[in-house]
Amino acid sequence: MPISLPAPFRALIFDCDGTLVDTAPAHFNAIRLALEQQGHTMEETWYMQRTGLTPDALLDAHDARLAAEPPSTGASLAPLDRDRVFRTYTGHFQASLHLLREIAAVADLARAWHGRVPMIVASNGRRANVEASLRSTGLLPLFTDIVSADDVAHGKPAPDVFLESARRMHVPPADCVVLEDSDEGLRAAAAAGMRSVDIRTA
């Protein structure tokens, strides 16, 4: 069933992970392996409930959980070296690009509107991973730009990535429509004064 967009609008903003591309299994496997190299663990169920977070916010939540629930073995874990985590995580993710698949209904919508209105990708992910995801699925040429967590002070649910997207497209926020799959993203769109489509219910 085609996705219905609220009209009128002058620009479209797409989330990447879980909206344009099914990346969650690859992201989880990458972060799991990166954490294991430092003796930490992360369960898939716990991760999947937090897929809308930035990488830093995800590790903040991980650290907070460890502080509240120390390992049952009684052994203390050394604090995470985050730079090492992100380097290793990016390497594992890039090695899994062949597993990524576009989310057809959203990708088809982007193809249908390509060249008709400005379109940009706004993601809580790291730019290298977002670009790689879009390139591996052939979607990158559809978009004029990418705004990632690397480009703003605060990720979703703050409105920063969406406001920066509107600025780069020279379109007022009220004239933008956001396509999202996370509660954090939908809250960010509302905070930016933009209309949104929750693709989970589309």
Image: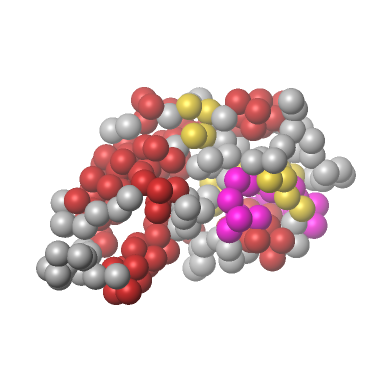
Residue at image coords 52%, 62%: 155
Q: Residue at x 43, y 29 (%)?
A: 100
Q: Is residue 141 visible?
A: no
The reply, left or right, for residue 103 in relation to residue 8 is left
Residue at figure coordinates x 36%, y 46% from the top left: 44
Magenta stretch encompasses residue 56: no
Q: Is residue 177 magenta?
A: yes
For residue 22, say whether it is visible: yes
- Residue at (21, 57) in percent of width and height: 40
In the picture, residue 6 is in which quadrant? top right
Q: Quadrant of the N terminus?
A: top right
Q: Please provide percent x and percent y for residue 50.
A: 46, 55
Q: Position of residue 73 (x, y in %)?
A: 14, 64
| 103 versus 81 height, above or below | above
Residue 72, horizontal then vertical, whole percent: 20, 65
Screen quadrant of the C terminus: top right
**Is 200 or 165 nearer to us in this picture?**
200
For the record, the magenta segment spans 168-186
From the viewer's perspective, tell me whether residue 198 is left or right of residue 8: left
Residue 64 position (above or below residue 45): below
